[in-house]
Image (tube, rainbow, N blue to C red):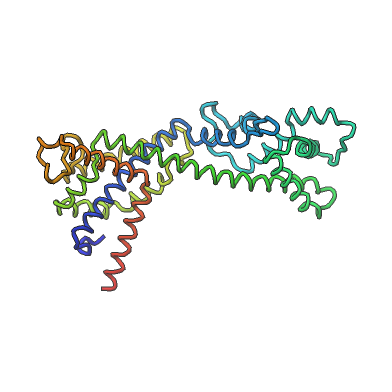
């Protein structure tokens, strides 16, 4: 980034402040990611949503709970506190079909109606599944499965007699897989919203602990051209590294690995970024930390006036702004910086 292009003081101040927010947001995302990995949060969140959304009120059956007790998923589970973080939609579809086909409630109905029940297929799984979706209470989930079965029948109707049942099962799994893909997409949106709230809380806590006041930072950059230049130079030199980290921790709380290597990698990244921030703080004499607490009120800038109502109010506001900046995520701020860089390079070429 050519600092000479941004000759306007306010533009330089804005860029410096955005770089500061990007670094802070990245640090908060790393802290959240570490927490997610330690607690296996992603897997637990997905399991809780499966159990919540797949409760069948019509039949009083929790299909989600039954699915997680299925052997195909239990084999992927390390412990009850650490459910699998990534289960493919196809696996979920296969487990749901198997779970419905072998549901105890459906088996009881089948025993009562065994004389009148005509077996259409040589495959018992298909017979039991079709019986279940036909005679169980018609909840939203059962209706979805019935619709999937009807579509699968249409697609399998042209198959050769010997392969018809195989094609039927494969098409059924494809239809249910599409449903789980859509469910996973919705779950990701819910999880991102939750993660943004958590990023705000982490940002608020970290800002309070080490005094990251955005209003004071703005005032500092406004009166220190050397600090502005140094901050922009830092970003220019470390742009590639920071963008790689932003991509790695860009989606808040979406990390899936919980092994020791992944945890150590996250800890290493946090330690490395913390060192860079500490170095910037020392070299640029940034007003971060309670030892360098300043009042953002120009009229009450002396140390003895730091406990006035206006200073306390501005301090709270400055910390909340920092927390809000963290909640937006590092990619948001790095994207702004990338666009600013691109704009600067384009204008320079035209000139």
Camera-nearest residue between 277 and 120: 120
The answer to whether residue 149 is left or right of residue 331 is right
Task: Kindly identify the residue that appears in the image at 22 percent across and 62 percent down.
Answer: 6
Camera-nearest residue between 68 and 279: 68
63, above or below 90, in the image: above
Task: Kindly identify the residue that appears in the image at 34 percent across and 60 percent down.
Answer: 339
Determine if residue 245 is in view.
no
The answer to whether residue 283 is left or right of residue 40 is left
Determine if residue 56 is in view.
yes
Q: Where residue 112 appears, x then y in whole percent? A: 84, 28
Furthest residue toward front: 309
Q: Where residue 257 appears, x then y in whole percent? A: 48, 37
Task: Kindly identify the residue that appears in the image at 79 percent across and 27 percent down.
Answer: 108
Camera-nearest residue between 222 and 313: 313
Task: Kindly identify the residue that appears in the image at 20 percent across and 37 percent down.
Answer: 312
**Quadrant holding the C terminus:** bottom left
**Quadrant holding the N terminus:** bottom left
Figure quadrant of residue 50: top right
Q: Where residue 290 appears, x then y in whole percent? A: 19, 34
7, above or below 117, in the image: below
Q: Where residue 324 appears, x then y in whole percent? A: 33, 44
275, above or below 61, in the image: below
């Amino acid at each position: 980034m050519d600092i000479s292009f941004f000759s306007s003081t306010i533009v330089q101040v804005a860029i410096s402040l955005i770089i500061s927010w990007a670094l802070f947001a990245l640090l908060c995302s790393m802290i959240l990611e570490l927490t997610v990995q330690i607690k296996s949060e992603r897997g637990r969140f997905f399991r809780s949503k499966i159990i919540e959304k797949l409760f069948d009120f019509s039949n009083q059956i929790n299909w989600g709970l039954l699915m997680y007790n299925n052997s195909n998923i239990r084999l992927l589970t390390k412990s009850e506190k650490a459910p699998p973080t990534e289960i493919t939609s196809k696996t979920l579809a296969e487990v749901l079909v198997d779970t419905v086909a072998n549901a105890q409630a459906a088996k009881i109905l089948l025993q009562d109606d065994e004389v009148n029940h005509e077996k259409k297929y040589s495959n018992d799984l298909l017979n039991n599944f079709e019986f279940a979706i036909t005679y169980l209470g018609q909840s939203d989930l059962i209706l979805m499965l019935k619709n999937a079965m009807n579509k699968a029948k249409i697609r399998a109707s042209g198959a050769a007699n010997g392969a018809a049942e195989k094609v039927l099962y494969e098409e059924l799994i494809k239809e249910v897989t599409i449903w789980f893909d859509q469910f996973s997409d919705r779950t990701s949106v819910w999880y991102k919203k939750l993660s943004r709230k958590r990023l705000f809380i982490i940002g608020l806590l970290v800002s309070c602990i080490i005094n990251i006041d955005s209003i004071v930072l703005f005032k500092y950059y406004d009166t220190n051209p050397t600090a502005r230049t140094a901050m922009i130079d830092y970003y220019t030199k470390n742009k590639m590294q920071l963008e790689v980290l932003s991509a790695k921790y860009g989606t808040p709380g979406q990390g899936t690995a919980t092994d020791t290597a992944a945890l150590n990698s996250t800890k290493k990244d946090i330690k490395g970024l913390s060192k860079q921030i500490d170095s910037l703080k020392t070299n640029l004499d940034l007003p971060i930390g309670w030892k360098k607490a300043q009042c953002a009120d120009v009229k009450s800038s002396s140390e003895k006036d730091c406990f006035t109502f206006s200073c306390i109010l501005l301090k709270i506001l400055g910390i909340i702004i920092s927390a809000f900046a963290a909640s937006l995520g590092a990619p948001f701020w790095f994207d702004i910086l990338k666009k600013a860089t691109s704009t600067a390079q384009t204008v320079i070429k035209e000139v």
